[in-house]
Image: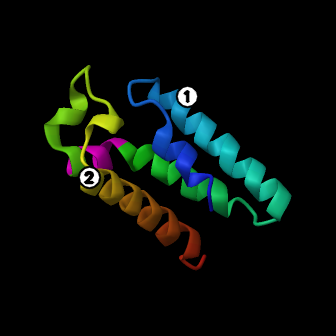
Amino acid sequence: MVYILFLYWYPIKENRAAFIGLGFLLGIAIDFFSDTMAIHAASTITIAYMRPAIMRFVFGVNFEFQSFKLSNTTRVQQITYLALLIIVHHFVFFTPNF
């Protein structure tokens, strides 16, 4: 599931509504070609919505400054951030629909 990297590398200070919309379009496009009935779309929307909270948890207050760049953080923080995105995605994706 390489498309999670798009959500990882998307610019931080961009419009959040556009980011959530792009996440939905990405997820629905993957669902269309893999015939999975909007599971990818729900997962990508959840990641896009929770991304600021995850970034605040991993990077602290630093992420809210104008000069913040993902490349200026430590490897441990980058790996933790990516791992949390993947965990949230997989939790939503693999949770059975009741």
Q: Residue at x 65, y 63 (%)?
A: 39
The N terminus: image quadrant: bottom right
Q: Residue furthest left?
A: 61
Q: Is residue 48 left or right of residue 97?
A: left
The magenta stretch is 52-57
Question: Is the stretch drawn in magenta largely helix, strand or loop?
Answer: helix
Percent across and percent down for residue 90 are: 51, 69
Q: Residue furthest top?
A: 66
**Is 57 or 6 nearer to us in this picture?**
6
Above or below: residue 97 compared with residue 54: below
The C terminus: image quadrant: bottom right
**Circle count:** 2
Mark 1: amino acid: Ala
Crowding near the residue tagged with mark 2, few <14, some 14–19, many ≥20 C-alpha atoms within 10 Å: some
Percent across and percent down for residue 37 are: 75, 63
The quarter of the picture where residue 31 lies is: bottom right
Crowding near the residue tagged with mark 1, few <14, some 14–19, many ≥20 C-alpha atoms within 10 Å: few
Q: Residue at x 82, y 65 (%)?
A: 35
> Which residue lies under the disc numbered 2?
77
> Considering the numbered disc 1 on the image, is that residue within a helix, a strand or a loop?
helix
Q: Residue at x 42, y 57 (%)?
A: 85
> Considering the numbered disc 2 on the image, is that residue within a helix, a strand or a loop?
helix
Q: Spatial distance from mark 1 to mark 2, Cα to Cα?
A: 25 Å
> Which residue lies under the disc numbered 1?
18
